[in-house]
Image (cartoon, rainbow, N blue to C red):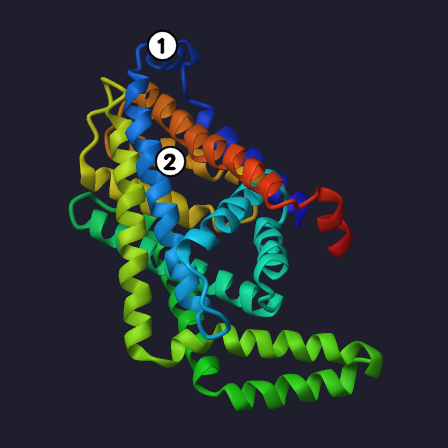
Amino acid sequence: MLIVGLLISVGFLWYALRDLHLEEVWTALQGANYWWLVPGVAIYFISVWFRSWRWGFLLRGSKQVSANRLFPVVVIGYMGNDILPFRLGEVLRAYVLWRKEGINVGTTLTTAVLERLFDGLTMVLFVLFGLLFVPMSAFLSRLVTVASAVFFGALVVFLALAARPNLLRRVAHGLIARTVPRRFRPPLVGLVEGVVAGLESLRSGRDVMVLFGVTLWVWLLETAKYWLVSFAFAGLHLSYVGIVLMGGAVNLLTALPSLPGYIGTFELGIKILEGIGTPSAPAGSYILVLHAILLLPVTLLGLVFMALEGVKWAEVWEVR
């Protein structure tokens, strides 16, 4: 999988950057007004707080944990995704939450999958909204078709599992009993119970609507960050609809295997912006700066929070 991610990142990075004139990109970077990054980063961390609230909503069947207590854990997880392969930031935050709150790792990982599911569905809606005003390229058409099938199909599966928790238990326990030696069964049974608990929020239509609503708000905030950062580049002239379309498409692409920090997949935003008429140099400089401020602040803050929580890398690798 690491090789696949490397190949995807390198291939996408080459495709995104191959037509850029670096001297023009450098000129655009030199002429940018970087003060616009300040409100952009501030809004981003507000969106992360609301992500923390959403996570607490998903976890409440196991334990009530406030968004303020979850915020550092979420940031640590994002830091992990930015510097570790295989999206191990999700495992890292599951470990930190277990260490801090005693919540079953299976529950945490299940809620992480649900978060990605609701994020993906929202991104599909963002792309569809953008395409009401912008002509659909063949690439975006395929992206929307595949992503819609994957995320809506996954939602149906998770809703079915959530609706039949006892069936899920019986099937999982039966598989464990038939295939796993007795001494290894207890932790796996505990993991299954954690998964069942993590699916609890999908058993209520009201809860599902709350999750969709909060997810929509989170991504509207994040899109506002993208929009604010665009004002730093005088030649960009992006409409909010263009930002929504680009943000939705790029974040769908980051679901693909890639190097840590979504290197390469995020840079395809350059091609998406070019496809809606944005000049390549401002588009390239904007995406590179946007990606940098999506990575650096949360990574640095995540390292600080990890130190404050007293979590050592050695113990994380030992648990892994």
Looking at the rendered structure, the kind of residue marked 1 is Gln
Q: Quadrant of the C terminus?
A: bottom right
Can residue 245 be seen in this snapshot?
no
State whether residue 319 is above or below residue 12.
Answer: below
Looking at the rendered structure, the kind of residue marked 2 is Gly
Closer to the observer: label 1 or label 2?
A: 1
The residue that appears at 46% across and 32% down in the rendered structure is: 297
In the picture, the disc for residue 30 is 1
Mark 1 or mark 2: which comes first in sequence? 1
In the picture, the disc for residue 291 is none
Closer to us: 143 or 210: 210
The residue that appears at 62% across and 49% down in the rendered structure is: 86
Disc 2 crowd, CA 10 A, few/some/many (<14, 14-19, 20+): many
Determine the secondary structure under disc 1: helix
Q: Position of residue 212 (x, y in %)?
A: 30, 64
The residue that appears at 28% across and 24% down in the rendered structure is: 36
State whether residue 236 is above or below residue 136.
Answer: above
State whether residue 303 is above or below residue 229.
Answer: below
To which residue does mark 2 refer? 269
